Image: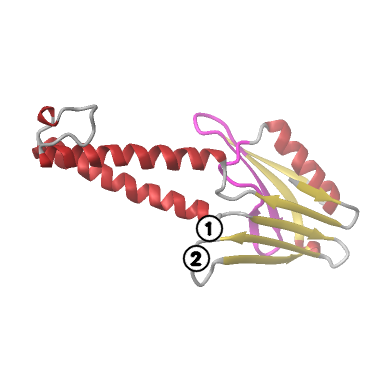
Amino acid sequence: MSFPSESIWIEFIAGSRKTSNFCWAFILFFGSLRFLLVGTSSYLGRNLISLFPSQQIVFFPQGIVMSFYGIAGLFISSYLWCTIAWNVGSGYDRFDKKEGIVCLFRWGFPGKNRRIFLRFLIKDIQSIRIEVKEGISVRRVLYMEIRGQGAVPLTRTDENLTPREIEQKAAELAYFLRVPIQLRNEE
């Protein structure tokens, strides 16, 4: 979502609070909980889940393995829930032509560097670059080339924009900043 005007362009970046992350966190949590309950049922010899009779799964080795998978899944699920709660990756890109400054802000993981804030001068922006990698794992990323700093990504790597969407986004931003567009194709 972007809000361009004549002198300021603000683009809000969605973090990890996406529908897909909520779905994966729920699926992983309940699936791993199920594995842990089946493993615990085999150890106790009692049915904690009516789906499997406890006699069908022997504690050693199947019950131990299922318990391990359940515990590992709960850890991964906890990690996903934490990234959702902290909204890691969210923030904004602000291009201000009046002040001649570009500000990029993102929320990171809690700690010393939770707030990630980058500031550049608009006059140091050389170009907007589109990087396209086609094939099995398609990747289309928009970069801002900064003189003496290198490339700074403006889109998330997991944001699957169509070629038309990324071209339009690059064209609008390049027009606003009055810089050229570069295309880099990887096979």
Q: Which residue is mark 2?
A: 110
For marks 2 and 1, give the CA distance. Answer: 8 Å
Relative image position of residue 100 (x, y in whole percent):
83, 65
Task: Tell me if label 2 and label 1 are in contact, CB under 8 Å.
Answer: yes
The residue depicted at 69 percent of the width and 56 percent of the height is 92
Residue type at mark 2: give it.
Pro
Q: Which residue is mark 1?
A: 86
Going from N to C along the chain, the mark reached first, 2 or 1, is: 1
Residue situated in front as seen by the camera: 183 or 45: 45
In the rendered image, which quarter contains the N terminus? top right
| Residue 149 shows up from this direction | yes
Relative image position of residue 94 (x, y in whole percent):
76, 58
Q: Is residue 104 magenta?
A: no
Relative image position of residue 145 (x, y in whole percent):
70, 55
Place residue 167 in its image quadrant: top right
Relative image position of residue 85 (x, y in whole percent):
51, 55
| Residue 65 shows up from this direction | no
Q: Which residues are magenta?
A: 132-160
Which type of secondary structure does the marked residue at label 1 adopt? helix
Q: Is residue 50 left or right of residue 74?
A: left
The residue depicted at 74 percent of the width and 51 percent of the height is 11
Q: Is residue 104 left or right of residue 28?
A: right
